[in-house]
Amino acid sequence: MTTTSDPDTRPSADPAFDFASDTEGPRRRPGPLRDFTVSPRVLVIVAWALPVGALGAGAAWVLLRLIGLITNVLFAGRIATDTVNPGAVGAPWWVILGAPVLGGVVVGLMARYGSEKIRGHGMPEAIEGVLFRRAVVEPKVAVLKPTSAAISIGTGGPFGAEGPIIMTGGAIGSIVAQRLAVTDDERRVLMVAGAASGMAAVFNAPLASVLLAVELLLFEWRPRSFLPVVAAVVVSTILRGPMLGYAPIFPLDTATWHITAGADVLCVVAGALGGLLAVAVTALVYASEDGFLHFGRRIHWMWWPAIGGLIIGVGGLIVPRALGVGYDVIGDLLSGKAALSLVVGILVVKSLIWGLSLGSGTSGGVLAPTFMIGAALGALEGFVLPSAGPGFWALVGLAATVGGVMRSPLTGVVFSLELTHAWPALLPLLIASAAAYGVSVLILGRSVLTEKIARRGRHLSREYTVDPLEYGFADEVMDPAPAVVKVGEPAPDLPERQRLFPVLDGERLVGVVGRGALRRDPVGWMAHVVTDPVVVGPHDTLVVVRDRLAAAGVTIAPVAEDGRLLGLIGVDELLERRQASASAGARRARASAGGTT
């Protein structure tokens, strides 16, 4: 058995680097320590994720068809559900100007008299629902959100369907979970599974949808959440084929591409520019929101989307193809078919009408507009940079802008590849997306998603870190020689710092007693003994110790094995380990900056 007296198991001066060398061999710990904590119940949640995925695919089909129907009726004067660009069907000017205003009025009325939760682009609301609202979504939101988004986009709004489908798919997962005997965590997983399945069906991008769920909604990578999300996404993607098609949305022919090392280097520049564009449009969105909050006080917020619709209509008169989701425009940009006038017009007008109108509180997503303005930036760069093939720089700009706006560089890369099947561009896209991400995080404190959450008084961190308590054990930080009291004996002198005293019967731990009880009743203290105290094992990780203390509402507990007392451990010891790790990191940071340790 490993004990605290063994020199190889004592904490090092730098606990963050307390690892055995190869010559010593691994430190052996008795008991089954697992990389992940997972219960067989995860299979039950996986099973429920399958119908959630199917419902998510159905919701995506309904949303896209509803958008197509509204667009065709208003702008083309026909009954059809295929996706068309509002500005490319020859609608008169008064329709282009007035339809977005009408859409804004309807959305405002739905928000006021239906649910305010339909306002906004969907992703921040989904994040809040997952993290702060126990993944509970009202059924009416599942109906009102896609309907309002379809009206907003179908009447010319320059938004995407991904935010609304994330909210709608998440609502479906939440509603299913609310009718099951599941925990809050399991309901959260089913909500995210629904959201990811909707994304996969809209974009035919299963891997990117899973990554987006991990990077933007789950904030964890655990089997309990990963497996159900994948199950739902797989079902949704399989069903998408017969409903919406099997091909990538923006297929690119990469046979003529010639990507050189020089192009890879230039992707750093392109990525940095994409990051600056991401900063600019994020600032524009929230400047617009601030403007509506400041100047719109005399007007009820219900009418703000109509004002945003007027902005959209004016932009549509200048560049008609900037209206709507604009998948056809993205396709032209990525294939290299867009003229310079369209490229500049999309980059300027689309950015302005999207950012300004989104701040009005209308309903619509951020991803598809980001695709378009990013592709426009890249296409513009393609007029200057050495050619690597038709659409190459447009694709690089798309990935970079997504990485900068969403602060999800891996999702941006995988999305770009799954949307186009341009697999040879993997390395350039990774370079550009990472560069844009770096620029964005250095300049802006929060992304377009987390800024909205912060403005509602919430805070979240999107950094994946290793908790120093994960790789420490109780016997490494416990007090190995605490004062004890023994059955049948008077209380001894009490050490000043010790608050809890193990009670021994011979050598066996039989309970604990508090310092206050010993002081008040030094003779009859046995009447105050807690005989079923919280006890931790020497080989329990410090995370297990923390959780056990928190669950019991205590701050200190004995460490024992087979009834034999080994020590005491409490919150102080846990904080000391965390502080030691933080101090070690600070010393290394100073050393790398040229300081001293």
Image: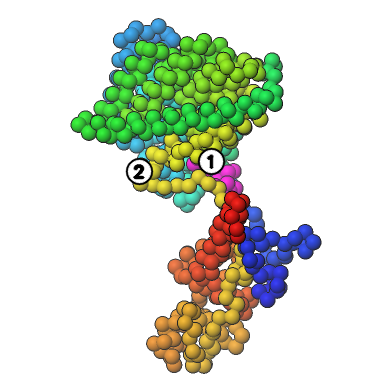
Q: Amino acid at mark 2?
A: Arg
Find out whether residue 221 is within the magenta segment: yes
- Left or right: residue 154 versus residue 212 is left
- Relative depth, front residue between 92 and 143: 92
Residue 11 vs residue 492, the one in the foreground? 11
Circle 1 crowding by C-alpha within 10 Å: few under 14, some 14–19, many from 20 = many
Residue 140: x and y, percent?
35, 36
Give the SS element for disc 2. Answer: loop
Q: Which residues are magenta?
A: 213-227
Are dots 2 and 1 in contact, CB under 8 Å? no
Residue at left offset 43%, top offset 90%: 522
Q: Is residue 118 left or right of residue 43?
A: left
Figure quadrant of the N terminus: bottom right
Residue at 66% x, 30% y: name it: 427
**Residue 298: % across, % down:** 20, 31
Residue named by callout 2: 456
Count neighbours of disc 2 (C-alpha within 10 A) and say few if under 14, some if 14 to 19, many if 20 or more.
few
Q: Is residue 173 above or below residue 4?
A: above
Label of residue 215 in the image: 1
Q: Residue at x 61, y 27 (%)?
A: 267
Q: Quadrant of the C terminus?
A: bottom right
Magenta span has 231?
Answer: no
Residue 412 is marked as: none
Q: Position of residue 529 (x, y in %)?
A: 47, 82
Residue 546 visible? The answer is yes
Q: In the drawing, does residue 58 fall left or right of residue 4? A: left
